[in-house]
Structure formats: C-alpha cells, structure tokens
Image (cartoon, coloured by chain):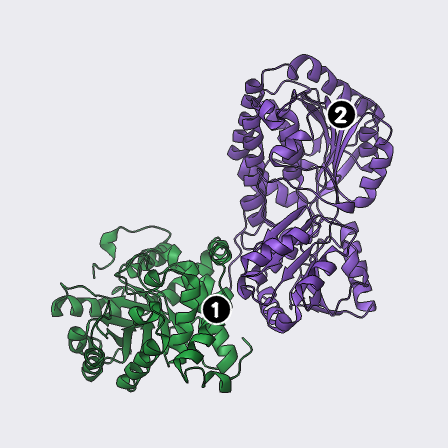
Chain colours: A purple, B green
Amino acid sequence: MRFEYAPAPESPSIVDIRSSYGLFVNGEFTDAKDGELFKTINPASEDVLAEVAAAGPSDVDSAVAAARDAYENRWRDLPGRERGKYLYRLARLIQERSRELAVLESIDNGKPIRESRDVDLPLVAAHFFYYAGWADKLRYAVPGREARPLGVAAQVIPWNFPLLMLAWKIAPALAAGNTVVLKPAETTPLTALHFAEICQQADLPPGVVNIVTGAGETGRLLVEHPGVDKVAFTGSTEVGRSIAQSVSGTRKRLTLELGGKAANIVFDDAPVDQAVEGIVNGIFFNQGHVCCAGSRLLVQESVADEVLDTLKRRMATLRVGDPLDKNTDVGAINSAAQLARIRELSEAGTAEGAQRWSAPCELPERGFWFVPTIFTGVSQAHRIAREEIFGPVLSVLTFRTPAEAVEKANNTPYGLSAGVWTEKGSRILAIADKLRAGVVWANTFNKFDPTAPFGGYKESGYGREGGRQGLEAYLA
Amino acid sequence: MTRTVADLSDVARSAATLRTFLHGLPGVDQVGAEARAGALATRSIKTTAKARGIDLAIRMIDLTALEGADTPGKVRAMCAQARSPAPSDPSCPSVAAVCIYPSMVRTAADAVAGSGIHVASVATAFPSGQAPPAVKLADTRAAVADGADEIDMVLNRGAFLSGRYLDAYEEILAVKEACGAAHLKVILETGELATYDNVRRASWLAMLAGADFIKTSTGKVSPAATLPVTLVMLEAVRDFRAATGQVIGVKPAGGIRTTKDALRYLVLVNETVGEDWLDPDRFRFGASTLLNDLLLQRNKLATGRYSGPDYVTLD
C-alpha cells in the first residue's frame, strides 16, 4: 500500500511579521538616517516578507557609540552574576518563544521547520544558558590572568543559521562583559530583529546589544569602524580575507569562521546504514548550507558500491518541499544568487566528467530549489572536489588505504571539519589525529554543542567558538 | 549486501562458516540507529494519512491473549472482537490474526472459522524456550494439528548467546519442518539479546533457517518492541531480499499501545523497506490493547469527537 503523508504544515500565524523593521540601536528601533530600505523575501515562495532598514555610515556610528556608552557605563562593571542573570533571562525567553522563532527562521531562511524546531532553536537557547553560567566564573576560564573584556565587538553573521550564529556571537561576548553591534545577513535579518524585541522584553540595558541590518557595505562599515575593539565574522573565505586585510595593523582582535570542504571518510568496516545516515545528514542537512558540511565523501573502494546503493535508496526517501511542512527534510535554497552558484558548480562537475545522480523528485514551481544531488567518479582535480558549493551537492571519491584517505582529506585549502566512520576505535583515534580539521566527528556528523569548541585550520579561519575556548576570544 | 543466493545456501555448512557469516555482517552503531528511529518518530501523520494508517494498523494486528489465566471463554470473546472490532461500524476492517497458547488453538480456530483471520499459536516452550528439543517439536506439532496456521516460536537464546549459532539455526530448521504448511514466526526476544549487533545477527540466522517472519519479543521481557530494534530488523529483511529475492515479514510485539506508536512503526516501515511491506502479510503488530486505541482514534476522525472507553468493546 502506498502511504502518502498528508500535508502537515506548521501555522505561520504564530509569528507576527511586521511590514517594516528599523535598526535596533541603544535599546530602541529607529529608522535608517537616510531612510534606505531593502526587502527580505521568503525563498520558498519569493513573496516579500518585510522591508528592513539599510544602515549607512551615520547609523553604524550611532550603533557603535551606543555600544561604547553601554560598555563603559552599564555593562563592563556589572558584577558577573548580574550579567549572568540577563543571559539566563534571554535564554528562557528564547525557549518560551521558540515556536514563533522557529517558524520565522524557516520562513525567512527556507530551512525545514523540523530542523529549526529540533536543532536551531534548542541550540540557540543552550548557548545562552551555557555562557550565562560562565558570566560569574570568568577567572576560571583564563587561569593565571585577569579576565577583562575587550570592549565593543563588531559581529557579522551569515544566512545559513541566522539565529544560531547570533547566539554563538552574542552569548560569549556578553558573558565576558563586552557589548556588541551585530549585522545579520541581508537575506535573513528577521530572527535577529525579533531577538532585539526579546532584549527589550528582558530589560537588557540599552546599547548592550545593537543590531544593524544591511548588505555587505554595512558589514564593511562596521568591521572597519575605528570604534570597535573586536571583529568576529562567520561567512565566506573571500569576505573573511578582505576583513583580515582591513583589520591588519589596527588594535582590533579578530576571529574568522569561514568556508569548508569537509571529508566524510567511510572505511570498509563502517556500520553501513548509520554511515549512510551520516552522509545524508552531513550534506543534505540545512540544504547543504553548512560551512562544516561533509561535502566530500571519501569511501573505501571495497565497499563503495554497497555504500552508494544504500545512499541512493536513502536519498529517494528525502522529502523536498514546503519548509513549514513538519515532514519536509530538505527545504528551499536561501537565495537566487546561491541557487545560481550551486547550478554553476554542478554544471562544472558534469563538464569535468563526473557522473551526476539525483532521485526523481518534484520541485515546487515558485521559490528557489535544488534537488539533492551526488556526483560519482570525482577526482581531486575537479572543481566540485575543491570549491565550496554550499548546497545539497555531494562529491564522491574513493580511496584504498587509510594513508590515502588522510592524504586526500587533507588535500584542500580548507580545514574546518571531517568525519570518520569505522567500527574500530583505534582507527578513529589514529585518523582523527592526522586530519587537519578543527572538528572531527566519529561515527556521526554535524553534531553541535555549546560546550564544544568549533573552528578551523587554514582557509577555514582562526579562533574558536563555543566552550571555554570561545570565551577566550572575547577576553583581553 | 552484495552476496548472492548461492553463497547464502552454503553459510550454514558448519558452525564455523555460520559464525563467520554472522560476524561479517556490517555492525550497527547504537547511537546512529537510535537517532534515525527518533528522527522518523517526529513525522507528523494527520488527516487522510492518519485514517489510512489506522485502518492498515488494524488489519495488521495479531490480537493477543497469552496469560496463564486465559480460558476458552476469554479466547472466544477475543475472537469475536477480532472478527468485528467495531460491531456497529461495518466499514471497520478485522484484524490479521489471533495469537494464543497451544492449548487454546482449537477454541480459537472454531471461533474465527470462515472469517479469514489467521490462528497464530506460540510454541516451543514459549516464552523461555528452555525445554528439551523433542518437547518443543511436540508443542509445535500439537498446535498445528489443532488448527494453527501460524506458529510463533522462540529463538534459543541460550544457544545464541553462548555462540552456538548452528544449534539455534538447526532448531529453527526442525521447527519449520514441524510447521508443515503453517507460517513460522521466529521471536528473537531482543530484550535478552541486548545489542543491535546481536539483533541483526539473530535476524539473519532466523531468515537463513527459513523463518517467514521475524518477531521482536514475547511480551514477557522488558524492553519488548522498540522503534530502533524494529529498524534494525527491517534493514535485515531489506538486505535479505536484496540478496535472495525472498520477502520476510516483521512483527514488533509488546509495548505498542497507542495509535501514535502504531503510526510511528508504519512510518518506519514506509521509509526503511517501502510500501511492499505495508501489508498484513509482511508486517504485523503483536498487541492486545492497541486495537481499542486505534478504534477510539478512528471514531474521532470520523465524528470529530472523542468517545469514552465504554464505546469500544472490552475484549
């Protein structure tokens, strides 16, 4: 019997999306001084959701000034336990409003509600809870030296996990006694603006958190602003490189979390069904819009056929479509520009001689969609094995020996994450030791926790977020 | 699995070859298997899908009475419910089978005669299986002779856990022969096997020996059926079909009490082995109280209102 699942949409009426949003500066929403606006759309329907203020130079000035004032007069000298109370309050409010925020995240970003509900929002709250606990224990975070905040942090975050990246940035900064000016991505500003409402609801002192929306130019103004002491950026390696250039020679501290081309290594003794789940979760989670996505599958040649057969069968059960349907596994691509890039690289894969496969799948007519795709017969020289695609596209390579697996895994300019699948514990340790990647997952993939430091080697950036190490990035 | 049928007919040639085969199966990562089952359990089955799922689940039930206190009267009452679960609603399907002890087979066979409902008898010294081989075979033959067309035997866990795989295998072969035309379900008693690696090996051992169904539990040991255990067994039957072309059924039993539980199992079947298994000949629920919850939910979908427990029959 065919068992079709009836549509099970989460109701969008739980969230009240305003027709326009201002900047959040000094505890209040204000319009941009020159009145400029941009539109944010729902990538699953291309409908305009709201108009958002685009911050110009004078807006960035006032946001940084507000953050400076709050730092010096309202936040830096507050006892740690008092800062902790505010962070706990933010965490609890996020939990209380998690359904609303999850729906909003799915609407603005295109990610399935199952992920925003079960992954993003629980992690967002967990990050605030975790760093709330650190706020009055900073001297244990950096033993042997005085734990002093840096000042005003300029934070620029990407569109793939809008609210989660906000939490990764804001929670440790505030716990350490810094104040922040955060710029959410142009295509996904809405959850950050609703977080601003939560700051008001929590009676957070004005100016401690400021949110300036806008495109790349606003981000450039912010990180180059002479009034900031710390720059934290998550996004593409290209932009990260230019930020590193602009910050060099200044007193600003910098952390960068950039791109990746992670190897997911499957050995011949791996638990096949779970490894295939891990491959699927590694590359199709969040439509592959994940910097640490397992976008290169390295599978031992002796089990390659079996693993690929199982993978294809599994991919045929992926449900692509309406992000708000609770049964959707893969949602919409975040923007037309990103879709164009995924298409371009996929076409390059075909042109370079790799074999393309995707399961039969009906895509909605409106919106931005890309069917989950794998390329087999990929070699190290192909663009799809070297460049970050940032979409639901997996490149499959094979290897013969553990040494070859390590060599291929490390043969990339990136070094953010990697996965190892084997039933043999000693092999996990031996391989993980040799992989030049900031995170190595063993028999799992794309698992995050606020207590675990996250960050990259080489062109994947520097500095760590999460855990005690994440706090150090915000302490002098 | 990439093995061929010819390989498989040979794996039970000796204790050593059978052991090598079973230990050569890919391992099961406990965390990953439980995460996958947990993720599928979040599927949201509503409206028309729920209605179809409920009717399918009813048709898949082995309505079960396995108590020392069972009497002919009790078994006849259960058989009446099996025939028409909702007496006032002719659109409600009947269940797949009734499942009873061997001593009740004749009573049950008479009570369901002509209805198409199968008579399943537990056998082989259910639930422990700790009886001499001759007794187990006699138990099986008696149940078949009295009219059982399905036999639910228990795996010899003593043999399996001590590594005597061939003993366990040969016992199933012998019971299969004693079954004649009756279908054989092999109860693995996964709560006693403890690891998913053992569940996968026991599934293959039973299938190689000729089981028509593999079943999770007797219901007398906790934990009984769970979603991850059933997932591992479904993967085994999927791989067995890929290797041999033969389709083996799966029956989770014990602890499945609510409509929500049942729908989660159907989702698991749908997304692991596909629609071929969404059929009472290939998937069954061993349950006694599940039926009434399915009926309550069925009624709710039809009328928009919940009726009280007095609106479904007691047994």
Q: Chain of mark 2?
A: A
Q: At 54% from the left edge and 60% from the top edge, which residue is drawn?
A: A424
Q: Choose top left, top right, bottom left or bottom right for residue A29.
A: top right
Residue A433 seen in render: yes
Circle on res. A19? none
The chain letter for the residue carrying disc 1 is B
Query: Are labels 2 and 1 on one chain?
Result: no
Q: Secondary structure at mark 2?
A: loop
Quadrant of res B57: bottom left
The residue sitting at 31% across, 83% down in the picture is B176
Q: Is residue A144 above or below residue B11?
A: above
Q: Residue furthest top?
A: A73
Q: Is residue A256 above or below residue A139?
A: below
How far is mark 2 from mark 1, CA to CA? Answer: 58 Å
Q: Nearer the viewer, mark 2 or mark 1?
A: 1
Determine crowd level at label 2: few under 14, some 14-19, many 20+ residues with C-alpha closer than 10 A: many
Total marks shown come to 2
Query: What amino acid is at disc 2?
Result: Asp
The image position of residue A269, as x and y in percent, is 56, 66
Q: Is residue A371 visible?
A: no
At 26% across and 62% down in the image, what residue appears?
Answer: B288
Looking at the figure, which quarter contains the C terminus of chain A?
top right
- The tag on residue B235 is 1
Q: Position of residue A191 (x, y in %)?
A: 64, 36
Residue A31 - label: 2
Name the foreground residue: B6 vs A191.
Answer: B6
